[in-house]
Amino acid sequence: MKKYTAALDVGGTKIKFGIVDTDGIVISDAEIPSATDDESPDLKCDRMVRVLKEMCAGNGIVFEELRGIAVASAGPVDVEAGTIINPYSLPGWLNYNIIEALETRSGLKVRLDNDANGALMGEVFLSGTAGKKVLMVTIGTGIGAAFWDGTGLYRSGRYHPEMGHVIVSSEGPECYCHHRGCFESLCSGTAMNARAKANGYGNFDGLYEAAGHNERAKALLNKIGREFCAGIFDLAIIFKPDIIMLSGGMMRRYFDFFGGLVQKDMVGLEDFVDTLTVQPTSDNKNTALLCANMMFTD
């Protein structure tokens, strides 16, 4: 008999919903705004459970028979306490106990993880690489990184390790991590667009295009590339992955550029990093929802 799990991907602008079967098929999906209106987290949780129940009813699935609800949330999150510790992209949700709120409303078991971990678990499930060491780096509003060690997720206590804040330069703006030159402040999608704009290129797309015929643009693009490689190298020499996955919209558009730089940077460094493959993530739009089958394995 097929089993089903509910999944929630809680991001800074939207919350995605899914009902996932044990084969990794998202039976139904939907989304609502997260931090873009005045609805409180309590009311949001009311809506979450209501939407999940409606999705189950529409697909002939008994809500009460779900294995549980898997939540992947923009971090930091405290996976032990069940709380979201995120004033940065989820204002109003700071110290909110989403596990308690959803369990009370649903009567189901709820499990919580950082969205970077959720996305990685979904990719590992999809690609069948659970026996490999996989480092996934997501370039978006910030930089999220997660590591699967071949048997499970790398953790550092209650909080997901904020690997996007390794230092890659002595220059750059001061980040909210209180340091200058961190990976996120220089190489997130937000940061790369801002650096391009500050130099007169509109955004990173404009910089990349100009670099084909303008030496000044080419110099800036090369600098960003070196700092990007430094951030990936910092993580690679610590975790020794078999696979590095580059994720996020900018990586989908510019994987050949950034992935090529990283792969080239690793050549001849076998005494520092193992032989590895650099690859993009899948095109599946619901990858983070598939973490449900890694969070609920019983």
Image: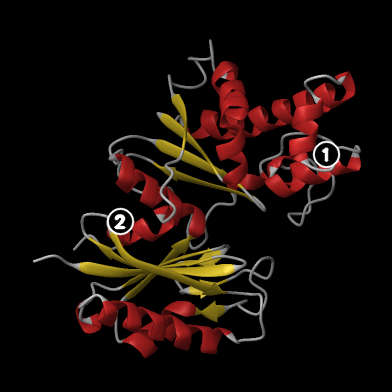
10 Å crowding of disc 1: few (<14), some (14-19), many (20+)? many
Query: In this rendering, which labeled residue sits more in front, label 2 or label 1?
Result: 1
Residue 294 image label:
2
Q: Quadrant of residue 24?
A: bottom left
Q: Residue at x 43, y 56 (%)?
A: 288
Query: Residue 82 location in percent, x, y?
Result: 46, 74
Q: Residue at x 66, y 29 (%)?
A: 230
Residue 48 image label:
none
Q: Residue at x 61, y 66 (%)?
A: 12
State the separation of the CA atoms marked 2 and 1.
39 Å
Quarter that holds the C terminus: bottom left
Instruction: Give whichever of 56, 222 is nearer the camera.
Output: 56
Q: Using residue 64 as the reference point, say whether residue 202 is left or right of it.
A: right
Instruction: Say whether marks 2 and 1 touch (CB < 8 Å).
Output: no
Mark 1 lies on residue? 196
Q: Is residue 224 above or below residue 136?
A: above
Q: Secondary structure at mark 1?
A: helix
Q: Residue at x 41, y 37 (%)?
A: 134
Q: Is residue 145 visible?
A: yes
User: Tag 2: residue type?
Assistant: Met
10 Å crowding of disc 2: few (<14), some (14-19), many (20+)? some
Q: Is residue 271 above or below residue 206?
A: above
Query: Residue 84 location in percent, x, y?
Result: 55, 72
Q: Quadrant of residue 250?
A: top right
Q: Is residue 125 above or below residue 50?
A: above
Q: Is residue 78 above or below residue 64?
A: above
Q: Secondary structure at mark 2?
A: helix
Mark 2 or mark 1, earlier in chain: 1
Q: Using residue 290 as the reference point, say whether residue 61 is left or right of it.
A: left
Q: Quadrant of residue 94?
A: bottom right
